[in-house]
Image (cartoon, rainbow, N blue to C red):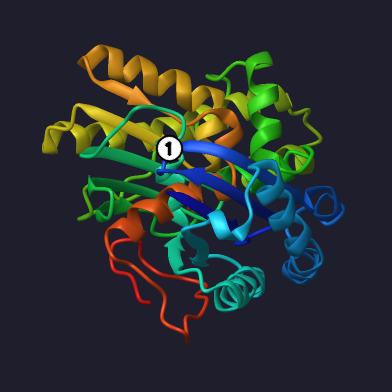
Amino acid sequence: MKILGIESSCDETAAAVVEDGRRVLSNVIASSLEEHKLYGGVVPEIASRRHAESISGVVEEALENANCTMDDIDAIAVTYAPGLIGSLLVGVNFAKGLSVATGTPLVPVHHLRGHIASNYISTDIEPPFLCLVVSGGHSHIVAVKSYTDFEVMGKTRDDAAGEALDKAGRTMGLAYPGGVSIDKLSPQGDDTAYAFPRPRISGAEFDYSFSGLKTAVINIMHNANQKGEQINVADLAASFQRAVVDCLLSNFEAAAKKHNYKQLVIAGGVSANSRLRADAQAMCRKHGWSLHVPELKYCGDNAAMIAAQGYYEYCDGVAANPGINAYATMPLDNLTY
């Protein structure tokens, strides 16, 4: 069964064809990242316009690379939540039009479910497992009970880990995206040079909070500037990255222990972070757990992961109604169609 996936939740316009939820036949991405670098972050209006300009060509290229036509496609999977609403609407409306024009079933896919599914095309993992989903907009601990049955066990109460990394990198004067720059610079620094808190949420066993960590970086930079002191940016980057990763893994480890999970998975854009991967692997070795992470090319936003999850949703009977809309926010374990 071949699924055409379409992804446009942020600044990547992507299309892919995936067979049986596991085998990637094509994966095409047109990114407007370089344009957003001029502003130090994603500008929603620019992202939406670039999606509108790119989506037709990207889908056509994905079909061509997979040696397919729409006659070969069994269903169209499209990201419909969450994300930038203008960006989502471009993908959803294009997919709706293509579905109507070709008579191909349309399957709505939650973006975070797609990130989790990136592991299906990179590894041999099968549910049940415990997944840490970490991106610029989300930080979740998710019990994946089946391909379409999810339970959120913990999530951030404020900033996401990826957002904190990006904004900390910007405060340090590093190139956008800040999280990537921090990861590249950190090996050159001392990760014990600066003391950062490890925030805990009272009464919420596995929830996160990263706003205090972000504020701590800002305060360190401002205090140094006011006193005319020199900041060792590599040390600061390494110390901050260590604090973020420690917070992520401490709750992830606690949840796995409490609920007796032996298969652990990491997904989302921040799953590409080298410190997170290394420390997670060490944690799993200590406990005798297995760890699965996506190939680096599938960590960021892409349509192959949407097609992969779309396959399992379609097999479970999920189909969009004609009035399907896009949603800026939506919990991944309680979907609205």
Q: Which residue appears at 53% of the width and 28% of the height?
A: 295
Left or right of residue 63: residue 103: left
For residue 303, say whether it is visible. Answer: yes
Left of 145 or right of it: where is 324? right
Residue furthest front as drawn: 71
Direction bottom: furthest residue = 323
- The x and y percentages for residue 246 are 40, 30
Q: Tally the marks.
A: 1
In the rendered image, the vertical position of residue 180 relative to residue 7, given as above or below: above
Residue at 73 percent of width and 37 percent of height: 224
Residue 272 position, x and y percent, is 55, 31
Residue at the image point whose x is 27% and y is 60% from the top: 316
Residue 115, position as x, y percentages in the image: 46, 46
Instruction: Let me know if residue 197 appears in the view.
Output: no
Residue 278 appears at what percent x and percent y? 46, 18
Q: In this view, does 330 lie to the left or right of 31?
A: left
Label 1: how many Cα within 10 Å (few below 14, some 14–19, many 20+): many
Residue 225 found in image quarter: top right
Q: What residue lies at 39% left-to-right and 59% top-to-bottom? A: 157
User: Which of the pair 213/294 is nearer the observer?
Assistant: 294
The residue where tag 1 is placed is 22
The C terminus lies in quadrant? bottom left
Nearest the camera: 127 or 209? 127
At label 1, the amino acid type is: Arg
Q: Is residue 325 above or below residue 216?
A: below
| Foreground pick, 327 / 278 | 327
Q: Is mark 1 on a helix, strand or loop?
A: loop
